[in-house]
Image (cartoon, rainbow, N blue to C red):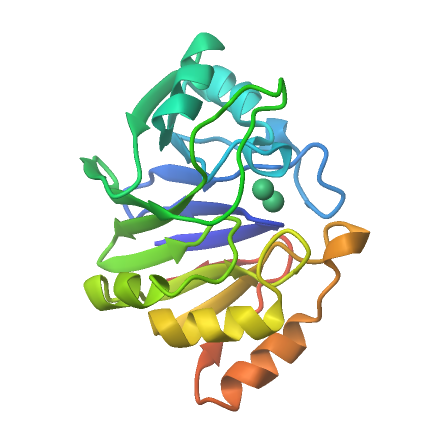
Amino acid sequence: MKLKYFSHSAFQFTTDEGKVILIDPFLDNNPTSPVKSGEVNADYIILSHAHGDHLGDTLKIAKRCKSTVICVNELANYIIAHDCEAHNMHIGGSFNFDFGRVKFTIAHHGSKTPDNEYAGEPAGIILSTGGKNIYHTGDTGLFYDMKLIGELHKIDYMLLPIGDNYTMGIRDAVKAVEFVNPDVAIPMHYNTFPVIQANPAEFQKKLEALNRKCKIMEYGEEIEL
Ligand code: NI
Ligand code: MN
């Protein structure tokens, strides 16, 4: 399986069977994204919440590619009302798709659509595919139940925000990694806007001092998981 980073919280997974799954595809209005929405394809789009920097270009991509959007119920209803296909889920629930399993976890944050409609609770995402468990925390502050998430799931890759202001900053993100205990931590949600400037090398240094692995992904970089 391959993992590609578009910057901010936007990632693309390509399974060995060739299924393409996007998470939080914020591309066209994202000043740091190396690609535009017209350049990506998706069989599935998984959303952590409805804020513009996460919902992003979901409707455009899902319409063009006939993607299924996977998200919490209230946001899924918004997607369906905009003539796209969605699979309604909610926090604590898992479901087996043809590419693997998706589970939604809690996240401490907000969620409203760009039209200011209620979009349910924000979520974290555990994607299990190709024998790996990937935990994309979504936008969240640090919470102690991350320990439970790490106890219940052997997390191979944890994708987590370090940009502060709207989410965890570096100090709390280091604690989050200790709680979840992933094999590798990948920082996200930083340096997209002036208020979320953070130095990923500082995050990496702090983790390495604790004998933990951190992979800083470049914008547009793709790695084999
Ligand atoms: Ni947000
Ligand atoms: Mn955000």
Q: Is residue 74 above or below residue 31?
A: above
Residue 159 point in image, percent of width and height: 47, 59
Residue located at (68% from left, 45% from top): 33
Quadrant where the N terminus sits is bottom left
Residue 195 point in image, percent of width and height: 77, 54
Residue located at (37% from left, 56% from top): 135
Towards the viewer: 63 or 199? 199
Residue located at (60% from left, 31% from top): 56
* Number of on-image labels: 0
Residue 3 point in image, percent of width and height: 45, 54
Residue 45 point in image, percent of width and height: 42, 33
- The answer to whether residue 182 is visible is no
Q: Is residue 171 above or below residue 75?
A: below
Q: Specify the quarter for ligand 1.
A: top right
Q: Residue furthest right?
A: 194
Q: Is residue 206 above or below residue 97?
A: below
Towards the viewer: 5 or 112? 112
Q: Is residue 84 above or below residue 195?
A: above
- The answer to whether residue 2 is visible is yes
Please state if 132 lies on the left or on the right of 34 as rendered: left
Quadrant where the C terminus sits is bottom left
